[in-house]
Amino acid sequence: MTTLDLLAGMLVYGVAIVMQGVIGFGANMLAVPILALINPDFVPGPVLILNPVMAAIFTLRERGSIDRYGLTWALVGRVPGVLVGVLALMVIAEDHLGTLFGVLVLLAVGMKVSGIHPTRNRRSLLVAGGLSGFMGTTVAVGGPPIALLYHDAPGVVMRATLSPYFLIGTPIAIGALAIAGRFGTSDLVIAAWLLPALLVAVAISHPFRGVADRGWLAPAIYTVSTAGAIALLIRSLA
């Protein structure tokens, strides 16, 4: 990975974290397809490593409104999803990973804009947790399945529940990837480069919480994510 790749990755990741800090979601959905285009080594390992850091900061910021019932069952469902995700990474050829990333990011965007409003109960939480674990492990974009279930919850409840969900759930995925030999020292080095961008972006986002025009910012995330995923698919298939 070149210095230019690292600098470009830091910029993209920083912008994505600002988006997440302002509206409560979208960091990895926005960053992953673009990072994979810059250099496939950015995903999923380095981004997964930083997810708990981001989640810890936002958990402290939004503490006090956690839906403990939903959090518990989503985490139970996440475990088998992580295991299936690790198996998928082990059997998919390296040169086909770009196609997998592109397809799953498009699926994530489709979930967010579909207008589907599933009922939040034990079964749906288990299913969403499993799908989230699979997507989070393979492409580091695991938020949409869980976010769909909280479409009717107050924003503070959704943010307060999703942050500890990723804080607890992501290390499970990292551990499984390490055991399977899909995680190494190079992932730690790249994550260390991205960490300053994350911390600066969190600080930038703080004063803008609740101020951004959510009517255009969320669609902008979907548009950029879709364009990045399509470009990644074209490059991988070509």
Image: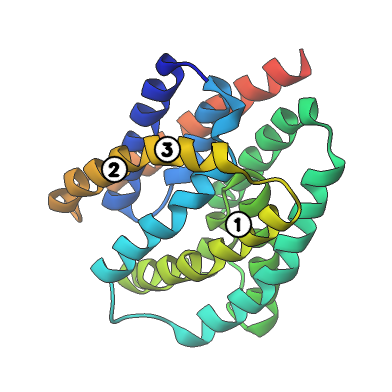
Does residue 6 appear to the left or right of 205 in the view shown?
A: right
Can you identify the residue that label 2 sits on?
18
Q: Quadrant of residue 146?
A: bottom right
Q: Residue placed at 24% from the left, 67% from the top?
A: 61
Extreme-bottom residue of the structure: 69
Percent across and percent down for residue 214 are 30, 47
Mark 2 and mark 1 lie on one chain; the one further toward the N terminus is: 2
Camera sees residue 222 = no
- Whole-angstrom CA distance, mark 2 to mark 3, is 12 Å
Judging from the image, the colouring scheme is rainbow
Does residue 231 appear to the left or right of 225 in the view shown?
A: right
Q: Secondary structure at mark 2?
A: helix
Q: Residue placed at 58% from the left, 55% from the top?
A: 142
Amino acid bearing label 2: Val
Can you identify the residue that label 3 sits on?
221
Extreme-top residue of the structure: 238
**In this figure, what is the number of numbered marks?**
3
**Between marks 2 and 3 in the image, the one whose residue lies nearer the viewer:** 2
Mark 2 and mark 3 lie on one chain; the one further toward the N terminus is: 2
Does residue 93 appear to the left or right of 131 in the view shown?
A: right
Who is closer to the viewer here, 1 or 116?
A: 1
Amino acid bearing label 3: Ile
Percent across and percent down for residue 175 are 63, 61
Mark 1 and mark 3 lie on one chain; the one further toward the N terminus is: 1
Label number found at residue 174: 1
**Between marks 1 and 3 in the image, the one whose residue lies nearer the viewer:** 1
Q: Residue placed at 48% from the left, 44% from the top?
A: 28
Q: Decide: few, some or many residues near mark 2? Use Cα within 10 Å; few <14, some 14-19, many ≥20.
A: many
Amino acid bearing label 1: Ile
Percent across and percent down for residue 23 are 31, 52
